[in-house]
Image (cartoon, helix red, strand yellow):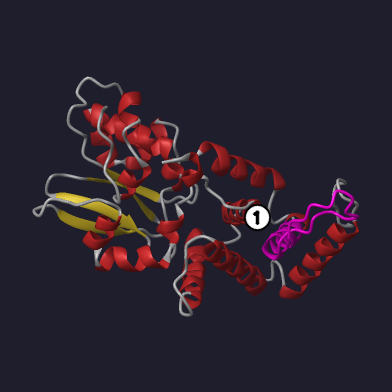
Amino acid sequence: MTEDALAPFDEPWQAQLFALTVALSEAGRFSWAEWTESFGATLKEHGRARPLDGQGDYWNAWLVTLEGLLARTGMAAREEADRFRALWEAAYLSTPHGQPVRIAG
Amino acid sequence: MPHDHHDHPHSLLPSDPALRVKALETILTRKGLVDPAALDVILETYEKKVGPHLGAQVVARAWSDPQFLAALRTDAAGALADMGISGRQGEHVVAVENTPEVHNMVVCTLCSCYPWPLLGIPPAWYKSDAYRARAVREPRKVLAEFGVTLPEGQKVRVWDSTAEVRYLVIPMRPEGTDGLDDAALAALVTRDSMIGTGLPGRPA
């Protein structure tokens, strides 16, 4: 086994997403059983079009599941998530290279 | 979207999923639904600290210390806590031992439940539809693809993980390892051998 084969995440956002989900569950926002049930349903749905590869597909399904769960429970409504995504995008596009990217608030 | 212009006027735009994750993180931390410090601890743990080396230490000790093995059989959580390993979601770890009669193999047909505290984040193949669908249906074929051929008489038992129960395979101790200490034994224990899709290495 090489170190690469054991690298837990391919991209930093996957690690952030994983940590966010675990932190929410540990803070009691949802149980892990609720999480696995929702996640399993997404994987099943996404897997209908083509078999999932367990890498990019997998983390994409994870993200879709978390967005859906947060929208359903009102913790982060779709509209809110879209708005903050747009704010971050605008911040990256307007921050000079090399400077820390921040959003207002 | 990587680009190499040194004089580019703005910061590199992260990918779409990266921006969506940042959005969720901002919303949740601003609402106080997650603590940024807790996030950092989880990141640090799973990126740097937890991995198959922990499971390998458990297997090595199970091979060398009969009392520990007995404790692992009756109360795995307690035995693991003694080694400083504990679960996060209150999940239950069950150790399943390979014998000449039975080879154990682990899957999660629902999603990707896995003994994180012992093995870290599962490899891509464990999370793939191909493995999740086929491990139960044709385990011997899947094992052959991993290069594992079992004796005819050895049965394969496949364990389906859940949010509550995670399995750790205790492979059979390889022959020729009598004089080895725990560190040398642990070096023989591969990640796949603890999932049941591999066998431990042999001493050089």
**Quadrant, the C terminus of chain A:** bottom right
Residue sitting at 86 percent across and 57 percent down? Answer: A103
Residue sitting at 51 percent across and 75 percent down? Answer: A46
Q: Is residue A100 magenta?
A: no
**Please, what secondary structure does the residue beneath circle 1 have?**
helix
Q: Quadrant of residue A87?
A: bottom right
Residue A33 higher or lower than B87, as above or below: below
Residue B76 higher or lower than B141, as above or below: above
Residue span colored magenta? B1-28
Q: Nearer the viewer, residue B148 or A58?
A: B148
Q: Is residue A69 left or right of residue B130?
A: right
**Quadrant, the N terminus of chain A:** top left
The three-letter code of the residue at mark 1 reads Trp
Horizontal and vertical percent for residue A68?
62, 72
Q: Could you classify mark 1 by the number of other residues whose Cα lies within 10 Å: few (under 14), some (14-19), or many (20 or more)?
A: many
Q: Is residue B133 left or right of residue B121?
A: left
Q: Quadrant of residue B155?
A: bottom left
Q: Is residue B112 left or right of residue B76?
A: right
Horizontal and vertical percent for residue A20?
63, 54
Label 1 is found on which chain of the structure? A
Q: Nearer the viewer, residue A50 or A32?
A: A50
Residue B132 showing in the rendered view: yes
Horizontal and vertical percent for residue A55?
51, 60
Q: Quadrant of residue A90?
A: bottom right
